[in-house]
Image: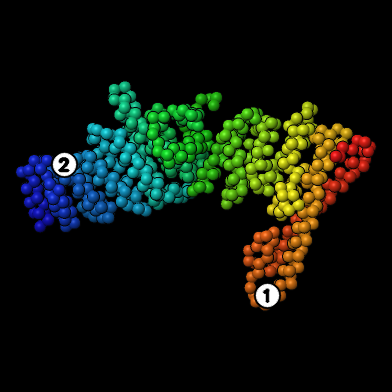
Amino acid sequence: MAVEELQSIIMRCQILEEQDFKEEDFGLFQLAGQRCIDEGHIEQLLEIIQNEKNKIIIKNMGWNLVGPVVRCLLWNKEDEKRKYYFLMLDLLVKLCNPKELLLGLLELIEEPSGKQISQIILLLLQPLQTVIQKLRNNKAYSVGLALSTLWSQLSLLPVPYSEEQIQTDDYGLCQCCKALIEFTKPFVEEVINDKENSLENENEKLKDELLKFCFKSLKCPLLTAQFLEQSKEAGNDPLRCFASEIIGFLSAIGHPFPKMIFNHGRKKRTWDYLEFEEEEDKQLADSMASLAYLVFVQGISIDQLPMVLRTEESVFSKGVDLLENGLLRIEDNSLLHQYLEIKSFLTVPQGLVKVMTLCPIETLRKKSLAMLQLYINKLDSQGKYTLFRCLLNTSNHSGVEAFIIQNIKNQIDLSLKGTHNNKWFTGPQLISLLDLVLFLPEGAETDLLQNSDRIMASLNLLRYLVIKDNEKDNQTGLWTELGRIENNFLKPLHTGLNMSKAHYEAEIKNSQENSQEVQKSKDLCSVTVGGEEIPNMPPEMQLKVLHSALFTFDLIESVLARVEELIEIKTKSAPEENIGIK
């Protein structure tokens, strides 16, 4: 019945001119063809499609059958008639209007979700490539539309993280990446071959679309991808192969990565004709970072360089690895301080501070700390001095400030031991830096517990200065500024310690007095410390927290007492007239 119905529609359309086909004809053809497929009349439908008399009809209406055929291939994987479905798909691709077919195929690619995304992409990439190559006009636009649609769907797939996930490739991302390279190659070759004998404007448009695709691929999946160890055969890692091909495409279309990397950030880029949308432009930095990582850390296509030259956490890890790779190539103390005037040079250590303090992964926090130290080591003396001032003013984190103060102490030690004087960590310059170290932000009312790491580091630095710098030599300038240091730091610290200890001792007393009532009710209790309420917890746990705070205050007080004792010893041992206390 379905076959006869389709034959009737075709006979009616055979006597019409192509321009006389009505929308109703298209709908009836699609419904009848769908019924033929549903009822299993595949061979009869094939005969109708292959009949030369129906050529014009199939050209205009046949694309409506692609969807039903593709769905049969996806859903009926054990069907004995699959070979007929494949043959029908090939015929439709060959005979139908390529413009209509292109839109139909892209709509089919956009439909599925989950694991079906890769299945339909792998099924339709070859037909899609054939259709685009048949188009005579606006090929660049069609290539761009296809690549954008394919990338949008692939970006929904999870990127495999472990070697096992890469090998099993449950969602098919790795297979799709390999197939996508084969899909793109003819268009890259077209750009290469047509450089001299095609319309320049159309060739540039095609390069434009290919370049956009490469940028997008560098961001997803390559920015979050994990690669197998380089010692293993590169061919076994599909994502590494994909990365290598993308970098190869960039070179082939006239954008070799050395030029791209070294020109990135300049006011005039080498790809200015690209009219990136605002959001795409923001993502360009991620793509360039991914490219640099692939080249310098993974070593992909690094031979192109001149001889002189996981999820969010995965991106952080790659960035830190890339930074390490670059810093290890630089000699210590060789980075000139003028580089810090370039915004990107200063944002690197500030970015490391953010990872150190905010990243939930311990290994990344530790690695970022090590990289910050490595970065500091590469700067010259003035650069170190400038960076220390900047981070002390901007980090807003006691632990980071303690780390910087320890570095200041190390630089002072090198200066005092050196054969020539380093003006940045002795004398007036050092005193200016110490003003940022030996003070309490809010005087005696400073939260000593929150700032304990910084305060302990500051006291240790002051103790070192008192011991190492003789009053007679006064290389650091400490002894002429001692009175100001006592007024701005030591005395407020004394007052703050007394206030803090009294407050916490009172809280301990209150907690102990209330503990029996709390135990009877078996409720959790809360304690307010420094104006903030400690989260509800058992009384014994809160007592531990309060006693721990008291222990911290005792530790600070012990070091403070030792510093003041050393100052007294030093000042008493000198003649009265040489004491430089103001």
Label 2 is placed on what type of residue?
Lys
Quadrant in the rendering for residue 570: top right
Q: Amino acid at mark 1?
A: Gln
Report helix, strand or loop for mark 1: helix
For mark 2, what is the residue?
59
Which residue is painted at 53% across and 37% down in the image? Answer: 297
Q: Farthest residue toward the top?
A: 196
* Quadrant location of the C terminus in the rendered image: top right
| Quadrant into which the N terminus falls | bottom left
Residue at the extreme left of the image, as rendered: 15
Q: Residue furthest bottom?
A: 520
Q: Is residue 270 left or right of residue 494?
A: left
Determine crowd level at label 1: few under 14, some 14-19, many 20+ residues with C-alpha closer than 10 A: few
Classify 10 Å Cα crowding around label 2: few (below 14), some (14-19), many (20 and above).
Answer: many
Is 108 positioned to the left or the right of 489 in the image?
A: left
Q: Residue at x 78, y 45 (%)?
A: 488
Examine the rendering and report whether any part of residue 414 can be seen: no
The residue labelled by disc 1 is 519
Q: Nearer the viewer, mark 2 or mark 1?
A: 1
Q: Nearer the viewer, residue 580 or 422?
A: 580
Q: Helix or strand or loop: what does disc 2 sit on?
A: helix
The answer to which quarter of the image holds residue 420 is top right
Number of marks present in the image shown: 2
Mark 2 → mark 1, Cα distance in angstroms? 85 Å
